[in-house]
Amino acid sequence: MNEIVDFATNNWWLIFPIGAVVGGWAGSIGKYNEKRRKDKIELARIKANAQTEQLKLTTTSADQLRRVLGQHDALTEKWFAYELDLATLIEYPLMADMREPLTLAFHRARVRADDLRPEPAAADVSTTSTSISPADFAEYRDAVGDYAAAFDAAEREARRRKQSGFSPVERDALDRARKLINVAADAGATPAERQAAYKRVRAELDGIIDVPQVAAAHLEQQIAGALERRPD
């Protein structure tokens, strides 16, 4: 102990540089601790913001989904005007002519939108949010938008061209098919006449336009309720 006291007494001048070093070291420690404290606060703020954004991303608005579903349904109704009415489809045959690029694009977009449509349980819009993920919703929304654009383009072209894109032979076949539809749907004709007319309609359209199954079934119901659906 006396040795330490003697050293301090004989080397008192070392107190000042050592004190400066210790003071600087203590100040650095204080600044480091303060920086760590601020970093922790900033990290907590970033995490809180990220959690808020994640909550927004994982909660798809029911109103948004309702609008997209409504748009999808409206497009389907417009297509049904052709798909259910074979006479209208014959008047604008490009809507079912898969040789036409615009028509092919429309049908591909329609199938994709139908495939991506959320299941009823996921598409429940009775609450403020839905169980569909944001990524799935965005993909479905974009698919419906593509469906709408493709349908409008195909319909404009079909109404502009009508039957002009078909050869004279094909146009004659379409005209005969239109007249035969009237016979097939005529309640005053005999069952045999109506069934024969229906068969001729299918024969006339074969290779020209693809008759949608829904349109064929609808026409069969018009011909006779008891007429059994037959394979092609």
Image (cartoon, rainbow, N blue to C red):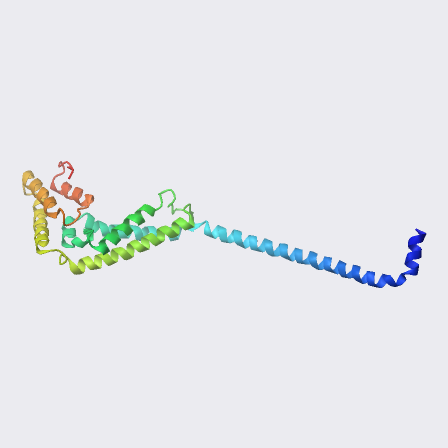
Specify the quadrant of the image occupied by residue 46. Answer: bottom right
Using the rendered image of the protein, determine whether residue 67 is visible from the camera's viewpoint.
Answer: no
- The location of residue 183, given as percent across then percent down, is 7, 46
- Which residue lies at the image location 91% right of the left edge and 54% below the top edge? 4
- Which residue lies at the image location 8% right of the left edge and 56% below the top edge? 168
- Which residue lies at the image location 7% right of the left edge and 41% below the top edge? 196
- The location of residue 114, given as percent across then percent down, is 30, 47
Q: Is residue 187 left or right of residue 141?
A: left
- Which residue lies at the image location 20% right of the left edge and 59% below the top edge? 157
Number of numbered tags placed on the structure image: 0
Q: Is residue 92 left or right of residue 50?
A: left
- The location of residue 135, given as percent across then percent down, is 41, 50
Q: Is residue 37 left or right of residue 84?
A: right
Using the rendered image of the protein, determine whether residue 220 is visible from the camera's viewpoint.
Answer: yes
From this view, report whether residue 228 is shown above or below residue 2: above
From this view, report whether residue 168 is shown above or below residue 187: below
- The location of residue 201, given as percent across then percent down, is 10, 45
Q: Quadrant of the C terminus?
A: top left
Q: Nearer the viewer, residue 41 or 107?
A: 107
